[in-house]
Image (tube, grey):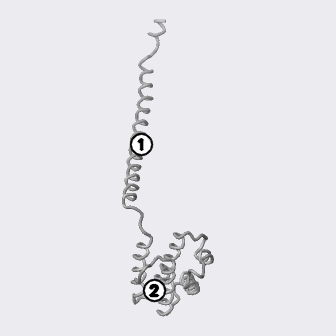
């Protein structure tokens, strides 16, 4: 047994084992660095979520009022493309509020179809405004009169009042 033990070339075996364990150590070190980076990103995500929770839920009515101020600024612009954008944003705002209030449907038109006309005095006007929005979306270069845009925006505003999103005149 001793003869066999001394007859082996242990230096060569030691060299190969050193190389194998060195490669293993490098891979392990790389995995540790990867895991630490992932952990730090996860920590950032958790911190962001905690900040959002601390800020509390935003009131959709306040958010809608802020968006409506921006829509009015676009409507008061001298640029007709801003007028078009005001209609597009007003339509999106009404759509968001309908979704928030629990009206189901894949599209704004689907949601408008299930709105109770007795609780929504401006439903026909909103349909007209929504058709204008579709014309703007499909042909943004077409010019619309300022009066048409203002009428559509008033229809959206009345619809938001009917939904009790706006309590007072904005």
Distance from Cα at disc 2 to Cα at disc 1: 51 Å
Apparent side of residue 116 relative to residue 86 in the rendered image (left or right): right
Mark 2 vs mark 1: in front: 2
* Residue 57 position by quadrant: bottom left
Q: Which residue is mark 1?
A: 35
Pointers 2 and 1 in contact (C-beta within 8 Å): no
In percent of the image, x 47 and y 76: which residue is there? 165
Q: Is residue 144 above or below residue 68?
A: below
Q: Quadrant of residue 170?
A: bottom left
Q: Is residue 5 above or below residue 153?
A: above
Extreme residue toward the top, this view = 2
The residue under the point 49% across, 89% down is 149
Compare marks 2 and 1 and give the one earlier in the sequence. 1
Viewer-side residue, 5 vs 84 = 84
Residues packed near mark 2 inside 10 Å, few (<14), some (14 to 19) or many (20 plus): many
Q: Position of residue 167 (x, y in %)?
A: 43, 79
Q: Is 58 drawn above or below residue 153 in the view shown?
A: above
Tell me which corner region of the image, top left, top right, bottom left or bottom right, holds residue 98: bottom right
Residue 130, x across and y down, in percent: 56, 82
Residue 115, position in %: x, y? 59, 77
Q: Which residue is mark 2?
A: 83
Q: Residue furthest front?
A: 118
Residue drawn at (59%, 82%) of the image: 118
Q: How many marks?
A: 2
Residue 70 % position (x, y): 40, 79
What number is the disc on residue 64?
Answer: none
Quick one: label 1, few (<14), some, or many (20+) residues within 10 Å? Answer: few
SS for dot 1: helix
* Identity of the residue drawn at 41% across and 49% down: 42
Front residue of 67/136: it is 67
């Amino acid at each position: 047994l001793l003869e066999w033990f001394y007859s082996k070339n242990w230096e060569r075996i030691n060299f190969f084992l050193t190389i194998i364990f060195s490669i293993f150590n490098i891979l392990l070190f790389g995995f540790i660095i990867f895991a630490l980076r992932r952990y730090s990103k996860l920590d950032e995500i958790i911190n962001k979520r905690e900040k959002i929770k601390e800020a509390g839920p935003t009131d959709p009515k306040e958010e809608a009022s802020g968006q409506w101020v921006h829509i009015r600024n676009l409507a008061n612009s001298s640029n007709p493309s801003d007028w078009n954008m005001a209609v597009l944003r007003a339509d999106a705002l009404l759509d968001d509020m309908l979704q928030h209030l629990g009206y189901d449907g894949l599209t704004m038109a689907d949601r408008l179809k299930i709105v109770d006309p007795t609780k929504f005095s401006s439903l026909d006007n909103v349909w007209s405004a929504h058709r204008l929005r579709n014309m703007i979306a499909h042909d943004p270069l077409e010019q619309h009169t300022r009066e048409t845009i203002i009428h559509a925006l008033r229809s959206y505003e009345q619809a938001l009042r009917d939904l009790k999103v706006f309590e007072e005149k904005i």
